[in-house]
Image: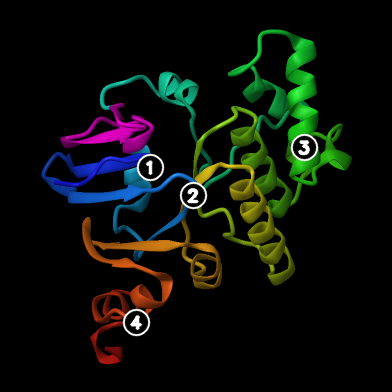
Amino acid sequence: MLAVNFFAIKDISKNFGGLMALAGVSFQVERGEIFGLIGPNGSGKTTIFNLINQYIPLTSGDILFKGKSIKGMKTHQICHLGVARTFQVVKPLKRMTVLENVMASAFCRVNSLKEAEKLALETLDFSNLLPEKDKPAKSLPIAGRKRLEISRALATKPELLLLDETAAGLNPAELDETMELIRRIRDRGVTIIIVEHIMKLIMSISHRVHAINYGQTIAEGTPEEVANNKEVIEAYLGESYT
């Protein structure tokens, strides 16, 4: 049996018609940890996030947050519990300003316009987007949109944050800034599960890494252990590299 601590997924599976996207994946995440989730394209990483937030229902298994099952709950209820996420394809509210985008998320925790603005400004200051607050969200470059996506999630005051390919499309300097932001989020007491293809990021900031391929677990351990795992190398580079 998988011990239940801060967060755990237990033997989860997802079947899309005749296609088994996930088959019996389990892991647990400790409070305050940065937990990396890796695998080739199509391996089921984003599907796991979609199941955690219940954008799609589980076929079988269970998901527990602070010892209680969130299986079958509504997405907004899970957010209110303290689980937030970003998306691989960022979709800001383009006609609204950067500040208004974050204020929209802040209403998850506050009830007045004044409180929402205060929380949004604090969040933008933390994520180094405050100078852009009055700009239309659609005017931001990709790095700014990625940071806005994180800011919107942070404005819901999560205890667990799911980051889906936050570094995709960034240049080396922007990547370093993103890594620093993720560490600062963790230092605020937020537990993080991160899906990422950029190994520099995953291997530099994760405490532990869980690797999946074809919807099944192939390895878990420290970044060094997973990077040297034969099945992981084969999944990413091919059998000739093992």
Residue 124: mark = 3
Residue at mark 4: 228
Please say if the residues under marks 4 and 3 sit with CB atoms less than 8 Å apart.
no
Colour convention of the picture? rainbow
Element type where label 3 sits in the image: helix
Element type where label 1 sits in the image: helix
Q: Position of residue 195 (x, y in %)?
A: 45, 55
Q: Nearer the viewer, mark 4 or mark 1?
A: 4
Q: How crowded is mark 4: few (under 14 residues within 10 Å), some or many (20 or more)?
A: few
**Structural distance between the alpha carbons of marks 1 and 3:** 25 Å
The region drawn magenta spans: 51-70
The disc, 4 or 1, on the residue closer to the chain's N-terminal end is 1
Please say if the residues under marks 2 and 1 sit with CB atoms less than 8 Å apart.
yes
Please say if the residues under marks 3 and 2 sit with CB atoms less than 8 Å apart.
no
Number of on-image labels: 4
Residue at x-position 57% and y-position 60%: 168
**Structural distance between the alpha carbons of marks 3 and 2:** 20 Å
Please say if the residues under marks 4 and 2 sit with CB atoms less than 8 Å apart.
no
Residue at mark 2: 164
Q: Does the magenta stretch include residue 56?
A: yes
Foreground pick, 230 / 55: 230
Q: In this view, does 161 lie above or below 194?
A: above
The disc, 4 or 3, on the residue closer to the chain's N-terminal end is 3
Q: Nearer the viewer, mark 4 or mark 2?
A: 4
Q: Can residue 30 be seen in this view?
A: yes
Residue 96's image quarter? top right
**Structural distance between the alpha carbons of marks 4 and 2:** 24 Å
Residue at x-position 47% and y-position 25%: 79
The disc, 3 or 2, on the residue closer to the chain's N-terminal end is 3
The amino acid beneath tag 1 is Phe
Residue 48's image quarter? top left
Residue at mark 1: 49
